[in-house]
Image (spheres, rainbow, N blue to C red):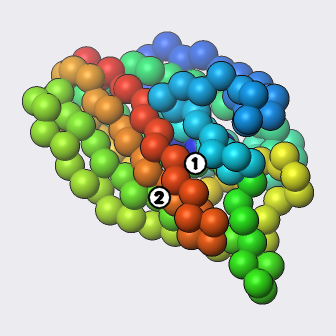
Amino acid sequence: MRVVFVLCLMLISTGCHANDIMQGHWESSRPSAGRKANGHFGANMVLTASESQVRRDWVKYKANPRIPLVKNVSKGTPVSALVVFHGCTPDRAGYCQVEAQYALRTPTGDTKQLGRSVIWNGLPGRYGQLQLGYPSLSVMPSIAGPYVVQARLVDKVSRKELNLSQTLYAH
């Protein structure tokens, strides 16, 4: 599974391919704040420059688009958070349901709960196939400093949970 955060940014960005982010088996991959696994259920959260570009490229390049990654933005720059995942467990009818609960810790130390949404309600991918969650989370930093974007993912069928976070710096 993979979680991807998409950012519309005005500053320097780097990039990588989706499979570079998600390479290897989740069970043996090195976990990080933005990438976690619980058995076969895995997810990654990244920050990127353009949600619409990533979604177009996701279809065009068969789930291995180049994702422009960013960590720094100017105040007022809109940020979209995406989740990329794999390994959800299907129910008896053959469908998975993955839910994300988002929160944002601001530079002042306040944590804002941003709501919950179903990011996938459909057929599971083939073993190891990455799936791009929908909808996304949009954030617009209003003051300078670090913002910590948090996502608690739940596979509603297996009840497995993943807690992911990425830090975004606004100036």
Q: Is residue 112 left or right of residue 122?
A: left
Which of label 1 and label 2 is nearer to you?
2
Q: Which residue is mark 2?
A: 100
Residue 66 position in % (x across, y down): 74, 30
Q: Residues within 10 Å of mark 2 (few under 14, many from 20)?
A: many
Q: Name the amino acid, label 1.
A: Val
Q: Residue at x 58, y 33 (%)?
A: 35
| Front in this rendered view, residue 49 or 1 | 1
Q: CA distance from mark 1 to mark 2?
A: 9 Å
Does 95 appear above or below 58? Answer: below
When asked about the image quadrant of residue 57, the answer is top right
Q: Position of residue 84 (x, y in %)?
A: 65, 46
Where does the image place residue 122, in percent across and percent down from the top left?
72, 73
Q: Residue at x 20, y 34 (%)?
A: 106
- Labelled pair 1, 2 in contact (Cβ < 8 Å): yes
Residue 125 position in % (x across, y down): 82, 59
Where disc 2 sits, the SS reads strand
Q: Is 150 left, or right, of 158 in this rendering?
A: left
Q: Residue at x 47, y 39 (%)?
A: 164
Q: Is residue 8 left or right of residue 19?
A: left
Residue annotated with mark 1? 83
Q: Is residue 149 visible?
A: yes
Q: Amino acid at mark 2?
A: Ala
Mark yes or no: residue 53 visible. Answer: no
Q: Earlier in the sequence, mark 1 or mark 2?
A: 1
